[in-house]
Amino acid sequence: SQTIHQWPATLVQPVGSPLSLECTVEGTSNPNLYWYRQAAGRGLQLLFYSVGIGQISSEVPQNLSASRPQDRQFILSSKKLLLSDSGFYLCAWMDGSYEQYFGPGTRLTVT
Amino acid sequence: AQRVTQPEKLLSVFKGAPVELKCNYSYSGSPELFWYVQYSRQRLQLLLRHISRESIKGFTADLNKGETSFHLKKPFAQEEDSAMYYCALIPNGNNRLAFGKGNQVVVIP
């Protein structure tokens, strides 16, 4: 069966520091992968998605970037965090029937 | 561009009362529609999708193309239905889901 992992679960970082959040998927190959930010009252905001290794589409211009160095690995990064980057970040993959499966999420607090 | 609207942020209902979560969408084609649910301390997960036409945990949702709506309904709310609910749409041939802002449902014992 397929499994999706995210780490770390929680992270507290100072403003201006770098960020690296990792997401890995098991049990499937060449999945479509997604990064979302979930905020109260603002729903789920799609940040990036990837249909293959090295292929990244950005949905919202911002302080973040994404990379997909391996088929089942998706990384969300920033060179310098802003206060506004605080939030709950979700990784997901999509199967052939368009159902999305979500990871447990990372709670990021920028101080 | 496609858009999903969920008008109520917070919905409080008494146990045993009916619950209805409204979802309206804007898309000119034939979308596929979903309801996702996030229970406390659990992952966001699929509740139901319109093509399956199933009742899941007592919930149903009917796609009304004329009104561009996909409202979620349950005749008798249970305490375990307390959760965050998101309506989502995927356009034909696309691979990106558009989510609404979500509804927090609180079922009062």
Image (spheres, helix red, strand yellow):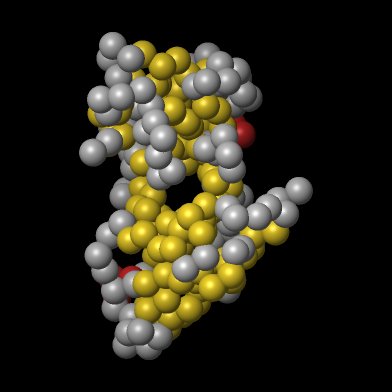
Quarter in which the C terminus of chain A is drawn: bottom left
Toward the viewer: B71 or B83? B71
**Can residue A5 be seen here?**
yes
Q: Is residue B94 above or below residue A52?
A: above
**Can residue B15 be seen here?**
no
Toward the viewer: A86 or A79? A79
Residue drawn at (52%, 20%), measured in percent from left and top? B51
Q: Position of residue B101 (x, y in %)?
A: 34, 42
Q: Is residue B28 above or below residue B76?
A: below
Decide if residue B46 is on the left or right side of residue B87.
right
Q: Position of residue A104 (x, y in %)?
A: 59, 58
Decide if residue A38 is on the left or right side of residue B45.
left
Residue drawn at (53%, 14%), measured in percent from left and top? B75
Residue drawn at (70%, 59%), measured in percent from left and top? A26
Q: Across the whole image, how many numbered discs are drawn on residues?
A: 0
Q: Position of residue B55 (x, y in %)?
A: 60, 18
Residue drawn at (54%, 73%), measured in percent from left and top? A69
Toward the viewer: B8 or A73? A73
Q: Position of residue B45 (x, y in %)?
A: 57, 42
Q: Is residue A105 above or below residue A28?
A: below
Q: Quadrant of residue A64?
A: bottom left
